[in-house]
Image (cartoon, rainbow, N blue to C red):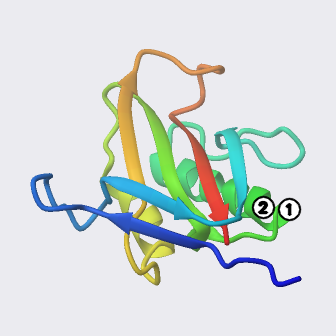
Amino acid sequence: METPKSKVELLSPDGLHKNPAFSQLAIVDGPARTIYIGGQNAVDKDGNIIGKGDMEAQARQVLQNLQTALAAGNATIANIVKWNVYVIKGQQLDKAFQVFQSAMKDMKAPPLITMAFVDALGNPDYLMEIDAIAIVP
């Protein structure tokens, strides 16, 4: 019996804003594995907070944590279709944005992104947290 192929399309259709940093929707056709990654922050495997007060260092740790989670599901950053990004109010995004843009440079289309400034996260030393959804065809 042949298994049907799946297809993942990230789009920014006419009628919606086209931004090179994110897509507007994801369409998944066919059987696929979906990976939901809970909020990742700047904590290393030993529970240490990395980069206290340093947005760029925290972004690098968050990215590393996301990559570790993805690898557990036989996926990579390229499989992410949706990010939810939470950043403490008043933080500068430019250096964190560069960390993630560098990691996404080989993607055919950028993922969907929701970003919110928040008053607090689970620990007062966290500057950002990201959860994600990945699709593995």
Q: Position of residue 50 (x, y in %)?
A: 68, 46
Question: What residue did someone put label 2 on?
Answer: 68
Question: What residue did someone put label 1 on?
Answer: 72
Tags 2 and 1 touching, CB below 8 Å:
yes
**Corner quadrant of residue 39:** top right
Give residue 123's mark.
none
* In the depicted structure, whether residue 103 falls above or below residue 63: below
Q: Amino acid at mark 2?
A: Thr
Question: What residue is at 40 percent from the left and 53 percent from the top?
Answer: 112
**Corner quadrant of residue 37:** top right
* In the depicted structure, whether residue 34 falls above or below residue 39: below
> Judging from the image, what secondary structure is the residue with disc 2 in?
helix
Q: Quadrant of the C terminus?
A: bottom right
Question: What residue is at 65 percent from the left and 21 percent from the top?
Answer: 123
Q: Position of residue 15 (x, y in %)?
A: 9, 54
Closer-to-camera residue (133/118)? 133
Apparent side of residue 19 relative to residue 113 in the rendered image (left or right): left
Question: What residue is at 31 percent from the left and 28 percent from the top?
Answer: 90
Q: Quadrant of the N terminus?
A: bottom right
Few, some or many residues within 10 Å of mark 1 (<14, 14–19, 20+): few
Q: Amino acid at mark 1?
A: Ala
Q: Position of residue 59 (x, y in %)?
A: 53, 52
Q: How much space separates mark 2 and mark 1, taking CA atoms? A: 7 Å
